[in-house]
Image (cartoon, rainbow, N blue to C red):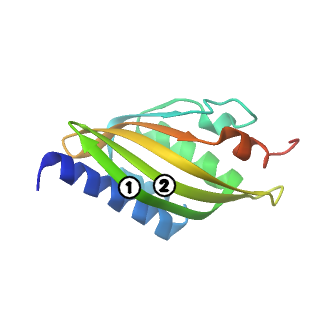
Amino acid sequence: MSEEQSNAATLREAFGRWHETRGSDPSMWRDYVTEDFQLRSIADGAYNLQFTAKRRGRADFEAYLTGLTENLEMNEWSLQDTIAEGDRVVGLGQTTWTNRRTGRRFSTPIAIVARFRDGRICEYMEYYDTAAVAATMDGA
């Protein structure tokens, strides 16, 4: 298996586990990310989504995941396609969540751009419908 294929398989495995746990075990990501992992989310802390601000380091990433799962309950996270070239893997999928306080639900396509180093994700950028997510938050 090539490094590109291996990285794509790792991304599929990670999101498969994330879906299976329904976000209840953010620590599972320790098996997939580097200690100096960096996360960027298209919302970047705006739209009443403070927990989506840029993160650096594994501990900061776990804080993001805790904020995410404290605010939202995962209903689905499916990675449908992966495209790999060099040290990058693009994942295309669908995710559905319910806001724990408002009960509002959203579903959005999602695109992930992950960069790998030594078989682990070292950078991750996520793109999704920020308007759909923001509409489920308090005050929306």
Query: Residue 112 occupies which quadrant of the picture?
Result: top left
Asked whether the residues under the numbered discs 1 and 2 touch, taking CB atoms below 8 Å apart as contact, a structural biologist would say yes
> In the displayed structure, does residue 50 sit left or right of residue 101?
left
Looking at the rendering, in which quadrant would you find the C terminus?
Answer: top right
Residue 79 versus residue 46 in the image, above or below: below
Residue 109 versus residue 44 in the image, above or below: below
Residues 140 and 70: in front is: 140
- The residue singled out by tag 1 in the image is 81
| Mark number displayed over residue 23 | none
Query: Identity of the amino acid at label 2?
Result: Gly
Looking at the rendering, in which quadrant would you find the N terminus?
Answer: bottom left
- Residue 27 at x, y percent in the picture: 44, 55
Q: Could you tell me which secondary element the residue under label 1 belongs to?
A: strand
Q: Could you tell me which secondary element the residue under label 2 belongs to?
A: strand
Query: Residue 116 occupies which quadrant of the picture?
Result: top left
Q: Residue at x 19, y 46 (%)?
A: 4
- Label 2 crowd bin: few (<14), some (14–19), many (20+), radius 10 Å: some
Q: Residue at x 74, y 33 (%)?
A: 47
> In the displayed structure, does residue 11 sit left or right of residue 41?
left
| Mark number displayed over residue 93 | 2
Q: CA distance from mark 1 to mark 2?
A: 7 Å
Residues 58 and 96: in front is: 96
Task: Name the residue furthest left.
Answer: 1
- Residue 55 at x, y percent in the picture: 50, 32
- Label 1 crowd bin: few (<14), some (14–19), many (20+), radius 10 Å: few
